Amino acid sequence: MVYEIIVGGEEGSKSHRLELEKAGGGWECRLDGQPVHIDAVIPRRDVLSLLVDGRAYEIKREQTATDLHMWVGSTRLAVELRDPRSLRSRQKASGDEKGPRKVLAPMPGRVVRLLVAENSEVEAGQGIVVVEAMKMQNEIKSPKKGVVKKISAIPGAAVNPGDILAIVE
Amino acid sequence: MRVIRACREMGIATVAVYSEVDRAALHVRKSDEAYSIGPAPAAESYLRMDKILDVVKRSGAEAIHPGYGFLSENAKFAQACADAGVKFIGPTPHSMNLMGSKTSARQQMEKAGVPFVPGTSRGLASPEEGEEVAGRVGYPVMLKAAAGGGGKGMRLVNTRQELRSALESAQSEAQRSFGDSEVYIEKAIVNPRHIEMQVLADEHGNTVWLGERECSIQRRHQKVLEEAPSPIVDPDMRRRMGEVAVKVAQAARYTNAGTVEFLVDQQRNFYFLEMNTRLQVEHPVTELTTGLDLVHLQIRIAAGEKLPFQQSEVQIRGHAIECRIYAEDPDNNYFPSPGKITVLLQPSGPGIRRDSGMYEGWNVPMDYDPLLAKLIGYGSDRRQAIMRLERALYEYFVAGIKTNISLFRRILRDADFQAGKLDTGYLDRLLAKGDHPVTSSARGAEIRSLEAIAAIAAGMFAVLDPASPVGKNGNTTGPASVPSSWKQQGRSEGLR
């Protein structure tokens, strides 16, 4: 397997090429062309015990409706995983910046009000709708600069995590 | 859950009440009997005295423990329980009423000789009177509108020269805002600490104090981290605070567990603030440092027993710190984050107590307070308690919802916290600093190696766990795909 993996760090994200081959009972691993000796088990779902040249790490996987993160110790790192051979993944990779982006509800709550109208232009990070949960109001922001193509959030309606609130193109 | 555990330990059967969204909550799963009292909004369920008293009738319960939310400080509910012939585990409605109103509490406490923030409790007649009072209590002083609120008509005055013009502007602002120009003066407590004293009183006139809790680490008037003892209270100050707290309780003819709150200034003078007429969320730090079980004692007192020990037998040993784990998003200004807990790894081991209401697979409802769990570290001294908590936080992992666990790592590592330099503004200052650890070259190399580890881990998850998503917005696990092993794990965690 060959993966293109983008890891978000403190100084922007970096792309890594990871090659994994089954070898004997374990895995042969090359990171950016460099061989790395690893051993890995998943003792339970979303937890990985990883030995890298004898150093032990426990890595936790966190998936939300919109993101994937790896926790290495107490450090949380955003990760994006692509299989370069997969068409779907390639389309997604190229479509991320240019194509339409969904604005998703990050948590269960109730839509309080809309901050913009359909077809209005928004900046990246501009608030689109206000969702209330546990008596606090939260602005859900636009993931990119563009035009609000559609608003599916209805004031007063309940939303679940992952529900589409709006689409920005 | 805390109360259910105590009852089970004492061989007492428990009856839980729940709202529709709490059917799967831990307190319902662990009680002996449980009854629904209505829909999610608290006003239609947990605050409905009539429905709760109906459950008392149906179940034949002999007593009600009100916990520390909802109706726990409601004198009307305590009275309704008395009228229905069921024991309310707490103080009498009379004591609750007295402490519920600031003015009546202040009058009673003044009679009892309890220290207040010095100043006048009526409006100033002239600037000269203001200068006289300020000279007596010492600068800085605070001018406050008698009808005030929200900071209007309030002025901090640092020197005598500033007083006259500050008084004039405060009076005119008070007139404009409230139609009342009455302004009074109080000594300004700069960067106060919030320290409270636990008291316990039986129904036979015995009252004891059980040591203080330092609760200065707050945000939006909500406590975040508490500890016992306070880093600045020595045995003499503790005894003096304890004696005042006992005096407060006795003046109110108080019974059962209660907490007397004080403001403490930088010279370690303490002033009565108010009394909380219930068990506090942070009671575990007192339990660990005194070796007492406060819920057991509450139940025994309510059953008419005498306190089983005297003041001289109360000993404070070691140090305990409590972290309140909230469902809050640290990356989004600590906004509440309800939802389903998909992964939960919980700490244990030496010196760690975890009072938790959450389990893996549980849906944290959006309707109530976001408190999920309390993680308490105990050590022979403060330093050991801190180290144990840091270790336990390293083991703690919650996914599916956001929590404030990372905030406690920052606090425990902060130099001011470690030095015990705390006041009620501490947490806002810490958060304003931002979370940017020094980017030394060593740290940079460490981050780069963590990034490489994360990349390898992401790949290994993908090949070892077929459910792993490919692509940032790919199919992520929905609520329907919870494997039963999660439930198993949740159950075994809940049973601990």
Image (cartoon, coloured by chain):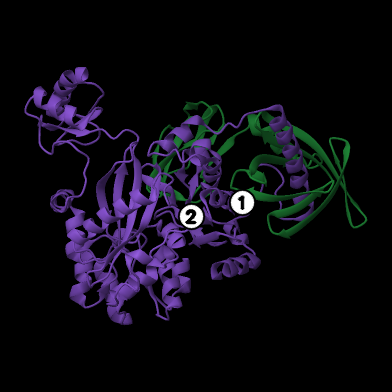
Chain colours: A green, B purple
The amino acid at mark 2 is Ala
Residue drawn at x 77%, y 41% is A87
Residue B448 position by quadrant: top right
Q: Secondary structure at mark 2?
A: strand
Q: Chain of mark 2?
A: B
Q: Where does residue B413 sit, x and y in percent of width and height?
A: 56, 40
For residue B320, which numbered disc appears in the image? 2
Tell me, yes or no, whether dots 2 and 1 are on the same chain: yes
**Is B70 above or below relative to B203?**
above
Q: Where does residue B367 sit, x and y in percent of width and height?
A: 39, 55
Q: Earlier in the sequence, mark 2 or mark 1?
A: 2
What is the quadrant of the C terminus of chain B in the image? Answer: bottom right
* Camera-nearest residue between B447 and A32: B447
Q: Chain of mark 1?
A: B
Disc tally is: 2
What is the quadrant of the N terminus of chain B in the image? Answer: bottom left
Which residue is label 1 attached to? B391
Residue A167 position by quadrant: top right
